[in-house]
């Protein structure tokens, strides 16, 4: 149902780099609307991880980085750590939905 | 430091109305370049954006729920409210309230403050 598509899961060994894609369309990311990323640790509320495509809120480690190009965005985690095992969601605005914000389908990151 | 706390009945019967409150502490619901959102998450599933209300009172709701959803603000109590009518089992979820921010040049900076969430089960 979501208009933003993410891979269901990605995995990596500690210290590795993983990336999560967020695929949209010309009515959301491709239209220039910003993308935000959230991390949801098990049993907790989501936490803002990346704001406005590339910006890390205070307290977010610089291991996390965001980028955007065309109709897609990506979240990269470098130097993967055990505590990074969580669900990650992208979020953007969609002009075809009457002023509505949408979340991506979510990606489970597993640290091997 | 702004904190959000959701509250409401944990169990609602099918066809009835779900009413939740989000109490804001450490800040005002009616000031600043903020909007207040409701988001839900069925068990084991992803996040679903329900709607938002700006300090101006303007509201936006998800098209799929639009006819059943009402979001309001009580500035005297510093609270937000969510009403969802004619609920079914599909409305069973953890419901979160969250604060978003914007500016004159940026539509949305994302949602930086979240409540812990409250679980609502729809069952007879």
Image (spheres, rainbow, N blue to C red):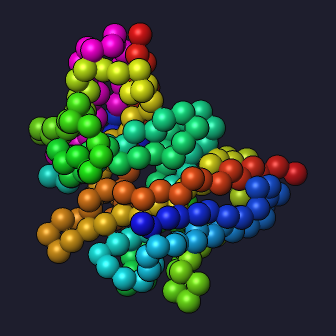
**Who is closer to the viewer here, A38 or B25?**
B25
Residue A53 located left or right of residue A102:
left
**Residue at the image position 76 percent from the left and 55 percent from the top:** B10
**Who is closer to the viewer here, B41 or A1?**
B41
Q: Residue furthest bottom?
A: B76
User: Where does residue B37 sit, x and y in percent of width and height?
Assistant: 46, 64
Q: Quadrant of residue A18?
A: top left
**Residue at the image position 29 percent from the left and 75 percent from the top:** B33
Q: Is residue A60 visible?
A: yes
**Residue at the image position 23 percent from the left and 65 percent from the top:** B107
User: Where does residue B36 sit, x and y in percent of width and height?
Assistant: 44, 68
Quarter of the image with the N terminus of chain A is top left
Q: Is residue A72 visible?
A: no
User: Where does residue B91 sit, x and y in percent of width and height?
Assistant: 66, 51
Q: Residue furthest right?
A: B124
Circle count: 0
Quarter of the image with the C terminus of chain A is top left
Q: Is residue B70 above or below residue A66?
A: below
Q: Quadrant of residue A93?
A: bottom left
Residues drawn in magenta:
A6-30
């Amino acid at each position: 149902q979501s208009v933003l598509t993410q891979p269901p899961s990605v995995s990596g060994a500690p210290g590795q780099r993983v990336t999560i894609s967020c695929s949209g369309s010309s009515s959301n990311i491709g239209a220039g609307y910003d993308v935000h990323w959230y991390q949801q640790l098990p049993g907790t509320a989501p936490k803002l991880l990346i704001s406005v495509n590339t910006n890390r809120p205070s307290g977010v480690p610089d291991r996390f980085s965001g980028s955007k190009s065309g109709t897609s965005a990506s979240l990269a985690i470098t130097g993967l750590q055990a505590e990074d095992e969580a669900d990650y969601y992208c979020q953007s605005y969609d002009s075809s939905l009457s002023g509505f914000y949408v979340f991506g389908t979510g990606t489970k990151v597993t640290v091997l | 430091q702004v904190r959000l706390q959701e509250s409401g009945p944990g169990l609602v019967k099918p066809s009835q109305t779900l009413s939740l409150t989000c109490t804001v502490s450490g800040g005002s619901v009616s000031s600043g370049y903020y909007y207040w959102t409701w988001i839900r998450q069925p068990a084991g599933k992803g996040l679903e954006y329900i709607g938002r209300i700006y300090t101006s009172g303007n509201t936006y709701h998800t098209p799929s729920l639009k006819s059943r959803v009402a979001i309001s603000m009580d500035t005297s109590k510093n609270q937000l409210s969510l009403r969802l009518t004619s609920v079914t089992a599909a409305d069973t979820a953890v419901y979160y309230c969250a604060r978003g921010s914007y500016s004159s040049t940026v539509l949305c900076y994302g949602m930086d403050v979240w409540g812990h969430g409250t679980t609502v089960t729809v069952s007879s």
